[in-house]
Image (cartoon, rainbow, N blue to C red):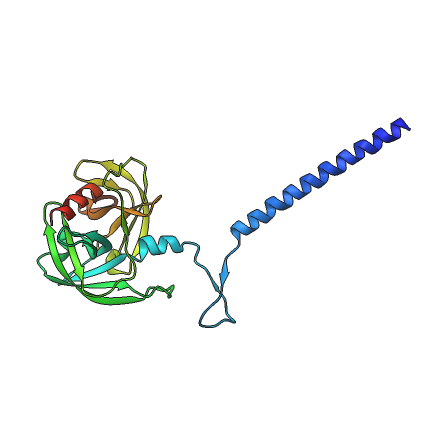
Amino acid sequence: MIKRLVVYGLLAICATWVFTAKTSLQDKLRTQREETEIVIVANPINPLNPVVKNPYQTEYERMLYPTVRITAGFSTGSGVIIHHKDTKVTKEEVYILTACHVVEDETTVDIELRRDRASELYDATIITGTVVITDTIKDLALIEPTGLVSYSAQLAPRKYTPYLFTPVWAVGCSLGLPPRPSQGIISVIEPDHWEITAPILPGNSGGPVYDARTYQVIGIAVWVKTYHGQLVTTMAGIVPINQIYEFLNHR
């Protein structure tokens, strides 16, 4: 009788352990499926044809959409929409930050931006902008747009501390095309400039460089090194965030 009770007890313990392990495995698999499932949302245009929600919508809205293409005379470059509080007014104003050599001596420029929040496609809208101030030493320029904008980027704090190997995204209108991102790290830190390994091409000048962890602007792309006349696209220079704040505060 005692042996039989012992056997029954052992069988009960084994059954409980198997059930617990199976339940834990099912929960784990269910969690993994939930994390990897594609999110389906309703299509307002055609309810019978649902659409897939973009898993990178945050990156789109905080880094890609605020980037604009700038045409100044025969020059084409990039810029980024920011909100800046002018010392002459009490509220923040919308501006476009870019490189000085993009606007050159022009006083007005064409700005191609994305204004439609609902569309997942690149919906370009062209507005005009007035060059407010330029700084040839820092290679920065500030443009005031004459139309409404839907997206803006966030500047990193004034006391942002850079580190080598910090992951970054450089976003710009490479070769005059719509904005596109490239990934890299901070590779050089100097008082007046930083360098990144994110590939930069002509047309990226004036485009924003983001800290990939916070989606905040930490610099503006301004130049690429050359070797025997060839562009070294992974050795690009940016105006760092501390220089950007100095530029904005002196306008």
| Residue that sits furthest to the front in the current view | 90
In the rendered picture of this protein, how many numbered marks are placed on residues? 0
Name the spot of residue 138 as percent of width and height, x first.
Answer: 13, 45
Q: Would residue 4 be seen by someone viewing this image from the given angle?
A: yes
| Residue that sits furthest to the right in the current view | 1
71 versus 205 height, above or below: below
Name the spot of residue 109 as percent of width and height, x first.
Answer: 15, 63
| Residue that sits furthest to the top in the current view | 2
Residue at the spot 79% in from the left edge and 36% down from the top edge: 12
177 versus 183 height, above or below: below
Residue at the spot 88% in from the left edge and 27% down from the top edge: 3
Residue at the spot 22% in from the left edge and 40% down from the top edge: 194
| Residue nearest the viewer, comparing 226 with 39 | 39
Image quarter in which the N terminus is found:
top right
Name the spot of residue 184 as percent of width and height, x first.
Answer: 32, 43
| Residue nearest the viewer, comparing 72 with 131 | 131
Residue 8 lies in what quarter of the image?
A: top right
Left or right, 176 with reference to 122: left
Residue at the spot 19% in from the left edge and 53% down from the top edge: 97
Q: Would residue 200 be seen by someone viewing this image from the given angle?
A: no
169 versus 119 height, above or below: above
Name the spot of residue 31 as percent of width and height, x first.
Answer: 57, 47
Left or right, 187 with reference to 243: right
| Residue nearest the viewer, comparing 234 with 80 | 80
Residue 131 lies in what quarter of the image?
A: bottom left
